[in-house]
Image (tube, rainbow, N blue to C red):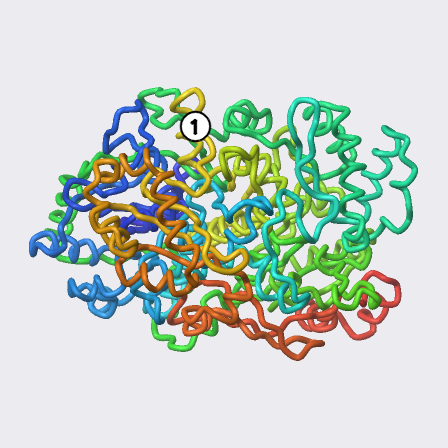
Amino acid sequence: MREGHEGESAESASALGNLTVLEIGDEAGLYCGKLFADMGADVIRVEDRGGDRFRRVGPFLGKEPHPDRGVLHVYSNTNKRSIEANLEEPADRELFLDLIDRADLVIETLPPGRLAALKLDYDSLARRNPSLVVTSITGFGQSGPWRDFRSSDIVANALGGAMFVTGETDDPPVLLAGSQALVAAGALAASSSMIALRHAVRTGRGQRVDISLEEVVASVSHITGVGRWIEDGVIPRRSGSALTASCPSGAYPCRDGSIYLMVNRPLHWKALAKWIHEETGNEEILQTEFEGPSSARLPYKELIALFVEELTSRHTVAEIFEEGQRRHIAVTRISDVDALIADPQIAARGFFEDVDPAAESGMLMPGAPFRHSLTPWKLRRRAPRVGEHEGEIRSELTDRARKKGRASRAHPFSSAQAEPNSKDVPGALAGLRVVEFGAGMAGPWIGRLMAYCGAEVIKIESLGFPDVTRLYVPPRHPELGIQTQMSPWFTDWNAGKSFVALDLEKPEAIDLCKQLVARADVVVENYSAETLSKLGLGADVLREANPDLIHLRSTGFGSTGPYRNFVSWGPNIEAHSGLASLSGFPDRPCTFSQYAYPDSLSALHGLFALLCAIAYRERTGAGQSIDLAQLEAMICGIGERVLAEQIEESGPGRLGNRSFDAAPQGCYRCAGEDRWIAISVPDDETFEGLCHVLDLPNLAKDPRFSTLSARRRHADSLDSLIEEWACSRDEYEAMATLQTRGVPAGVVQTTEDQMERDPQLAARGYLERIPHRIKGEVIANGLALGLTSTPGKTLHAGEAIGEDNERVFRELLGISRDEFGRLVESGVIETG
């Protein structure tokens, strides 16, 4: 471990600058390692001799294949160092063990059991380095009946439930662009690793972090998960760009393109209805039965879509975007990569970075997914050549040996708060207090994850402006009206927290907020940029109340720039980020998920960003602010596709279910209504296995299919053969047959499948049973953090607005009973 950072300046400060990380395996670990490297950690990529396989995956900068110029490598390996090693060779294995001695974290993606076969299993490594954290990212995790099955991005998206709800109703299930199972798993694994590292310094003990790609996808797509299915009995499925629970929502045509519009709050509907009436003279749009939450408008969904289109079709994209946002309506462009590069907001924030600043290549890639005020993301070096740093790393190990072994270690978290002899720390994030101002998912899911790991999270609400998830009308009993404690999404994003309610228009309520902030470690907010400032709780006020505060502000477009006050929801970010225009089949202009994916992904980035800031504060005592633009975090999630689109004038465009690094790859119809299986073939050996399953063993010798590039050129012919084989088969039997032959394959599961038919999720206890204030118990999608020694737990769900008022204000703030009563009577403290 490198020395600490005493006296480091704001210019040189690095949140993870004294953290050493080893990264080994396939592309599933790349994004996790990138997040650590870009925040200052020394990430050493231990590559196969000759370089990792993914280096030879195109497209390539400069068009000609080269192991240093593939877009996946160029984007995913920034700031890392590279050495080559064959761990079956004694000398290389010893080198790896020497690196283990100085490492804090290992990120590995080898098949389960592979490390043990090399005598490098977790227990062996922990005996050598007791505080070591080993984060394993695999298709199904380290246990369960499917643990040895092969996976891939498409297989994980299929089994995890994301594909079934993505795309057009009449199309096969389809992927989002850019290997999102691997990106989401990388972001979640990075957060889990930081949580495990914090626990390690307090106890002196590391742990294994067991990340399952299937569970990660199920977790990030939980909006369409088991909670909703149990609640309404309807299996969510593909429905184009419109969301099934939000009305109006979807892509609407303009004179020169399309925009995305979404209404989720009653006031936003009134603003839209007024606009439509003013422009078109439509009187029907003002009917009172359309007012209120989205559930009131859902029966009139098709009619309202016509009214909206009557407005949008009169104008250009720019006119609708600008006027809609002026009226505080969540409307955004549907951007492609060229539009992103020219976007005024992105340009104002200087988001894009040159791939190689020293060479001034002119190729741009995404920059910081979040912005720390003291320890910023920094592009220090381009992606490495194969084995580029072997000499310097060996020299460092030799110097260390001359200094007689491991020197005193400066851990990324503060040694001042360490509890090396403690055996029972109650939750890996115990001792942290979080104050949350927010609604929806992007901010609250951060608090949900932290509460699950032991942090105290206090959510501040108001009766006049409750969290949007409280505006819930039970679909089976609409006559009951709004039920503020019953929403499955309220459980998903808020279970485990404490709830207080304040009328924030009253000065005394603002003072109570300041008192809570003064006793907190972290504030998380995801209101629009100026909301808290207008209430008298701007960043400067919060900092004055608590100079050591870590303050994360998560907004659609960021806290600076011309769009800083614009309104957005997750699907708006799918549209504006380029994800929608890059996703789906070539004959579709854009494709949307049904689970507001940017909200999940930005929350995972936000959690990692907070943990980095906590690490820095526990090392130096300094708090800081973090500006997270959900738009920028989402663009980071498609970073290699952003590069790929710049290589040629037209770019590769929408790939559907196909891939640069596997062929055949697709989603194939099975027997039964809307039943499908995803298959991915990454290499020649796997293709031979597929040919045996198809009972066409000689197919592998056909010149049309003898290489990956040839199979990509003739993918249509292969798809027809696979479809013919699959269409008469049960999807689970087909999956088992293919996996027996070593072919990555997975059923395109519905949420009902995951609960009733998936033995892997059942064996690993993925679904969580949570005590509920009204229902007694609810079942929710798990959080997939994979912490094996400090597993999280949700203690309660379904709280009323202000349920914890008395405990928080009287016990934490010390307010007397009489004063508490006065504040309740005056309406400063509200009760539901």
Residue 209: in sight, yes or no? no
Percent coordinates x, y for residue 628 in the rendering: 55, 42
Vertical comparison of 455 with 722: above or below: below
Q: Is residue 741 left or right of residue 476?
A: left
- Location of residue 410 by image quarter: bottom left
Residue occupying the point 71% across, 68% down: 486
Q: Residues within 10 Å of mark 1 (few under 14, many from 20)?
A: some
Q: Residue at x 85, y 49 (%)?
A: 291
Residue 101, position as x, y percentages in the image: 20, 58
Instruction: Identify whether 617 is placed above or below 540.
Output: below
- The residue wearing badge 1 is 645
Asked if residue 308 lies left or right of residue 69, the reply is right
Residue 406 in sight here: yes
Q: Secondary structure under badge 1?
A: helix
Amino acid at pointer 1: Glu
User: In the displayed structure, does residue 684 sit left or right of residue 615?
Assistant: left
User: Which one is nearer the viewer's eye here, 313 or 740?
Assistant: 740
Furthest residue toward bottom: 776
Q: Based on the displayed image, in which of its 4 quarters is residue 581 positioned?
A: top right
Kindly identify the residue that appears in the image at 44 percent across and 31 percent down. 642
- Rendered location of residue 235, percent (x, y): 61, 61
Q: State the residue lying farthest toward the left.
A: 90
Tell which of 233 and 61 is nearer to you.
233
Q: Nearer the viewer, residue 582 or 570?
A: 582
Instruction: Please report the residue visible at 48 percent of the width from the left and 70 percent of the height from the top.
Output: 757
